[in-house]
Amino acid sequence: MASLTRKQFLGVTAGALPLQVRVASAQRRPKNVLLVMTDQHRQHALSIDGNPVAHTPNLDALARSGTRFDYAYCSNPVCTPARASLHTGLYTHHHHSWNNGTPWPFEHKTTADYLGRAGFMTASIGKLHCVDAQTHGFDYKLDFNDWFQYLGPKAKLWADELGHPNSGSGQPQIDDLWRDYGDPWKGLREYDGRKGSVAVGGVSKLEEHDGFEAFVARESIRFLKNHGKQQPFFLVTSFLKPHDPFMPSARFAAKYPAEAMHLPDTWGKVNLDTIPRQIRASILLDRPTPELKDPEQAKRRIGYYYGSLEEMDDAAGQVLKALDDLGLADDTMVVYTSDHGEMLGEHGLWNKFVFYEPSVCVPLIFRVPGLTQANVRCATPVSITQVMPTILELCGVPVQSGVDGESLVRDLKQPSAKRQTTVYSEYALNSPRAKYLIRRGDYKYSHYDDDTPELYNLRDDPKEMHNLATTEKSRAAELDAEILAWRVK
């Protein structure tokens, strides 16, 4: 069946669910969309944001040519639910992809479904992490399993670096593939002496051109060359780095020696009596990487994170350059974001899973030809659930009613007009450890089903070191009631 044109799609409404037609005003609509994604890119880990360690020249250049949001919150600080939210515009309690082992439900349509029906060629190259065999609207799809096929016997080097099954890093990409007979690499890996399940970090055993970032960049450029001028496209270029294992290629690892790294200001300074029990336990012992109690090991890990980040930036830059070289940049909307952040030693914590800013906030950049201004920042707190309806509005495609995210087009048009917004996040739903976050104005409140609540004034306490839940009880109670009402909607 031939693809519908955008005009035909807009006319096909019979038997469809109710649509909310949010059509961007008179500005020129982008012909194409490139969504560049990474994994575990923490808030403000960009050199343009003043981070003294990060070296991200290509993302900096993208930011200078568009609008970046200072406070973009992930919907859930773990990969699969967050990515489901970004692609469907729904919060976790609506899309029901609860954790990294729960597939995205078929009934919730993605940006690719909408744009595919509107005549775009849709492509996902890299980490999608929908944890089953559905394509979720993508016509063209390359992922971890294709990379493993490219690697051939060298896939063992990646298995060694992971050290154990880790679907977040693509092995297995789909848990069910190993469920019947177990881990096929068991007994075959070469271990590196790590004390927990995750390595502190190191130089990758893979050659740079064999790494996942190089593969994703190379195949994205191939797609642009082969299909970029045939018809409108929606391309998701999705890298793994800086997600663990923090094992950058030698060229990038050498730039960030441990002795040049510094521990965060909050290291060792958290009042353990005022925070949730589960947070306290993680500070006292990081079970995946127990070595990180040692400050020197912590500095080493920080260096390898930033090496991984620069390697990703280098690969992303190759794709952005290809847009220019192929004459596609002037007709292509470019969006950059990540699924969640990384604590990287803040509060003595590592990884994600928590609601502190470095874990739950991510970079978000839009460059829309004919709309966004150059080198502009927006201070309005927003959610990655808003990426999907924003892309669709800018492409003139109707959005199904019931989507949680609201379009960011007005913020892109008037980025300096900071609005009063309410942003949510949630984690570990359907478990005894479920928790929920609400951000409104300067205040951020976290409700724990089984633990101590948290309330922070981000204007006065941007490092989140002073829990106000017991001293500002009326404000905490008000925000708690709003979370309880929101979570049952």
Image (cartoon, rainbow, N blue to C red):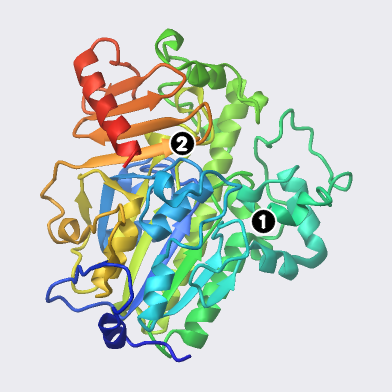
Q: Residues within 10 Å of mark 1 (few under 14, many from 20)?
A: many
Q: Quadrant location of residue 380?
A: top left
Estimate the spatial distance between the alpha carbons at disc 2 and disc 1, rounded to whole Å. 21 Å
Quick one: label 2 or label 1, which is nearer the N terminus? Answer: 1
The residue lying toward the viewer, choosing from 414 and 483, is 483
Please, which residue is most extreme toward the top here?
A: 273
* Helix, strand or loop at mark 1: loop
* Helix, strand or loop at mark 2: strand
Q: Image point 54% across, 42% down: which residue? A: 305
Q: Quadrant location of residue 395?
A: bottom left
| Residue 180: image location, x then y, percent | 80, 52
Q: Residue 95 vs residue 300: left or right?
A: left
Q: Image point 54% across, 60% down: which residue? A: 128
The residue lying toward the viewer, choosing from 343 and 192, is 343
Q: Amino acid at mark 2?
A: Tyr
Label 1 sits on residue: 174
Q: Amino acid at mark 1?
A: Ile
- Is the C-beta separation of discs 2 and 1 under 8 Å? no
The residue lying toward the viewer, choosing from 24 and 43, is 24
Q: Against 235, is 101 above or below?
A: above
Please, which residue is most extreme toward the front here?
A: 15
Q: Against 177, is 380 above or below?
A: above
Q: Against 194, is 12 above or below?
A: below
Label 2 sits on residue: 427
Q: Residue 419 vs residue 196: left or right?
A: left
| Residue 444: image location, x then y, percent | 28, 29
